Each structure stands twice: as structure tokens, then as C-alpha cells.
Image (cartoon, helix red, strand yellow):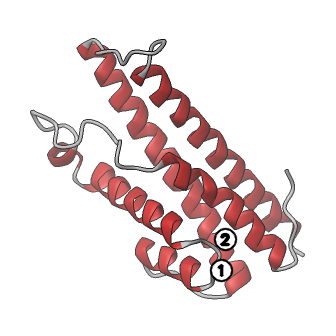
């Protein structure tokens, strides 16, 4: 067992879990006040969009680190693209189809955020001013699935 790889994986999943939990809290705070939905002030809407953009980036980076560690260290394959990363995890049954779909959407949003930002998020009006089509429950399950896969491969993770 390579202790350093286990620590990297544990750290990546911890950051990922914290990010998804924060994202869920952000959505709840902006979408509901008591029982009624609120209409946020335009500045609040921009703050929410910027926060979600950063959360998306952080979630993607932590998850891709964990996925690449899993694929390279346990499955012994090289990853050619983010889509291939998801395909391999599904093929090896490390994740389920539903979580794979959620992960592919995360990849699409990450690419748009990092490669086509002005066209996608900063246009007027914004093409995508929310990330509502991302399933946070499905994304949240990815961490547990990867932990279970590592355990199945005989490598228990810390935390």
C-alpha cells in the first residue's frame, strides 16, 4: 500500500465532500427563505453565480484528482480525456450510470467555465445563470462510490 496515494485520495474526497455540502447549503439558502421561494436582489444573484462557478471548479478538480488516482493506481489505465475518465469508472463499476451522467454534466460545465466563459456565463443575458441541471445528490454519491471501490480493491481509505 502506498500511504501517500491513500492520503491524496482521502484529501481529494474530503475536499470534494465539503464542496458539495457547501453547494447544497448555498442552493438552499438562496432558493428558500422559510417556506417561500425568494427573488434575490441582482447583486445577490451575481454573488450566487460566482459562488457556484467556484464551487463547480473546486468540485471538478477534487473529483478529477480522485478519479485519476483511482484509474491510474487501482485500474492501471491511462486517461485520455475527462469523458474517458467517466467511461472507465463506469466500465469498471466504480460508479453507476446515474452518477456517470452527473459527472459528465460536471465536466461539460467545467469546460464551459474554463474555455467558453464569456460566451456561456458572462453573456448578456447569461446563457446559463444557474447550475440547476446539475444533480447535487448524484454528485454527492460519487465520493461514497469511489470509497467503496477502493475498499473492494483492498484499500481502505482514511476518514
Mark 2 surroundings within 10 Å by alpha-carbon count, few (fewer than 14), some (14 through 19), many (20 or more) = some
Question: x, y (%) of residue 51?
Answer: 42, 30
Question: Residue at the spot x=74%, y=73% of the render?
Answer: 149
**Residue 78: percent from left, percent from top:** 56, 85
Mark 1 to mark 2 CA distance (whole Å)? 5 Å
Q: Which mark is residue 69?
A: 2
Callout 1 crowding tier (Cα within 10 Å): few <14, some 14–19, many ≥20: few
Q: What label sits on residue 49 in the rendered view?
A: none
Identify which residue is drawn at 24% across, 46% down. 117
**Left or right position of 67 against 82:** right
Tag 1–tag 2 contact (CB < 8 Å): yes
> Considering depth in this image, is 151 or 57 the residue closer to the camera?
151
Q: Is residue 86 above or below residue 113?
A: below
Q: Residue at x 55, y 49 (%)?
A: 137
Q: Position of residue 120 (x, y in %)?
A: 19, 47
Could you say whether the residue bearing mark 2 is in a helix, strand or loop?
helix
Amino acid at each position: 500500500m502506498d500511504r501517500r496515494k491513500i492520503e491524496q485520495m482521502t484529501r481529494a474526497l474530503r475536499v470534494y465532500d465539503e464542496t458539495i455540502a457547501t453547494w447544497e447549503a448555498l442552493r438552499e439558502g438562496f432558493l428558500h427563505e422559510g417556506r417561500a421561494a425568494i427573488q434575490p436582489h441582482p447583486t445577490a444573484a451575481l454573488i450566487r453565480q460566482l459562488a457556484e462557478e467556484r464551487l463547480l471548479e473546486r468540485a471538478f478538480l477534487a473529483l478529477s484528482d480522485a478519479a485519476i488516482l483511482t484509474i491510474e493506481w487501482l485500474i492501471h489505465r491511462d486517461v485520455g480525456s475527462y469523458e474517458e475518465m467517466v467511461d472507465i469508472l463506469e466500465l469498471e463499476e466504480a460508479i453507476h450510470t446515474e452518477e456517470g451522467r452527473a459527472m459528465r454534466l460536471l465536466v461539460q460545465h467545467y469546460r464551459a467555465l474554463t474555455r467558453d466563459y464569456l460566451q456561456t456565463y458572462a453573456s448578456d443575458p447569461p446563457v446559463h445563470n444557474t447550475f440547476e441541471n446539475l444533480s447535487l445528490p448524484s454528485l454527492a454519491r460519487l465520493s461514497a462510490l469511489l470509497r467503496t471501490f477502493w475498499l473492494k480493491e483492498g484499500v481502505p481509505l482514511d476518514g
